[in-house]
Amino acid sequence: MIIEIIIAVLIGVVGGIFSGLTPGIHTNLLVTLLFSISPFLLAFTSPLIISALIVSMAITHTFLNVLPAVYLGAPDSEGKVLSVLPGHRMLLQGKGYEAVTLTVLGSFLAIIMGIALTPLLLKFLPALYSSIKNYIGYLLVIISIYMIFRERKKFWAFFIFMLAGIFGIGVLNLNMKEPLFPLLSSLFGVAGLLISLKDNVKIPQQLITKIEIPKIEVVKAMSSAGIVGTFVSLMPGLGPAQAAIIGSQIIKLTDKGFLILVGSLETLGMVTSFIAITSINKARNGAVVVISRLMETITQKDLIIFLAVALASGLIAVFLSLRLAKIFSSLITKINYQKLCIAIIILIIVMGFWLSSYIGLFVLIIGSFIGMLPSLVGIGKNHLMGCLLLPVILFFLL
């Protein structure tokens, strides 16, 4: 079985590289496709091995998706939305490689933290969840209000949150095979690329130098991640973007510390989701949903295997991320940035049509216009997460 797990890890890493480096392509898409062919795969292997492949893919994705976020200003659906601001700012200062290094550091430390916290979470998570499960809808309302009121332009924040929420409700109720792909790819992928085209961004020469990372920023960022990461893992609809904002309010961070925090939260969220499905039988992301469908029960022994796979995948992803960041840094000034953005938009459009036909294209068009509003009016893109938060709030309260 060890050989099978190693092969699953390596295949998962390849899948994570593809989804991580391709804006608009999330692991949820690949995992869904994998699940659709699982009856064929199960003739040759076990649900545990397929699940290990999914774990490897999901973890690798959380490392690699920082590259398009920093170098293209095109984050994936949730995880690296906020890294665009400090990350792209550092890219325009010639420090794109440093920005990637900081987020990768956060991601790897998150795996270590998640493994270290596992015994505590297994013991206390069920009691914690049972104490708040009846109030999840109200907690999400409070968090959403806080996000809106921290903005200087509160009306626009509220308007965009509600607009994205209504849009999300509409899309999720359409008869579509993959509603999340056009929904999230338009709001966070295509919209960001269109803004980059509008601004006619010019990328300066990138520097590959020794990076000084203040230890105090690492400690502060990881402490913040530990505090909010576990809480967010219990809150459906909340993602790393919202967690990063909450975490940065608890502990004040510099741009470097913030990038470490952003990097850590998505990976930590993935690790804690494996713990959550084991301890409270709740799936908080697409990868874990598929794992829960493949495996009738997930035991603590299975969890240990998943954590070992996560650690191995993380070690490989650290090397790959830093190596690819050097390649990206050398190439980004030699290519036509505008043409690259257009090519990525076309790829997302083709994928949207392939998955959801003309209705997928319609969602992409509407979502792209909505997704550009935060940049145009000068507020945070995190309010676009109303597309998931509002439907979840209504589900719990109505």
Image: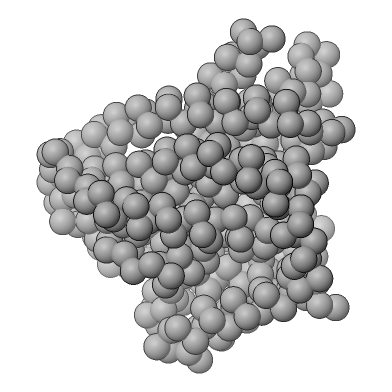
**Camera-nearest residue between 298 and 132:** 132
Q: How many marks?
A: 0
The answer to which quarter of the image holds residue 330 is top left
The answer to which quarter of the image holds residue 238 is bottom right
- Indicate the position of residue 288 as horizontal and vertical percent values: 70, 41
Q: Is residue 272 left or right of residue 171?
A: left
Q: Is residue 256 above or below residue 253?
A: above
Q: Is residue 156 above or below residue 176?
A: below
Q: Is residue 273 visible?
A: no
Q: Residue at x 76, y 14 (%)?
A: 45
- Indicate the position of residue 92 as horizontal and vertical percent values: 19, 57
**Camera-nearest residue between 100 and 302:** 302
Work out which residue is located at the far bottom of the displayed protein and give it.
Answer: 155
Q: Is residue 80 left or right of residue 53?
A: left
Color encoding of the figure? one colour
Q: Residue at x 57, y 25 (%)?
A: 308
Q: Residue at x 43, y 84 (%)?
A: 151
Q: Residue at x 44, y 49 (%)?
A: 264
**Camera-nearest residue between 328 and 242:** 242
Q: Is residue 129 visible?
A: yes
Name the image quarter holding the C terminus: bottom right
Name the image quarter holding the N terminus: top right
- Indicate the position of residue 105 as horizontal and vertical percent values: 35, 41
- Indicate the position of residue 56 as horizontal and vertical percent values: 57, 29
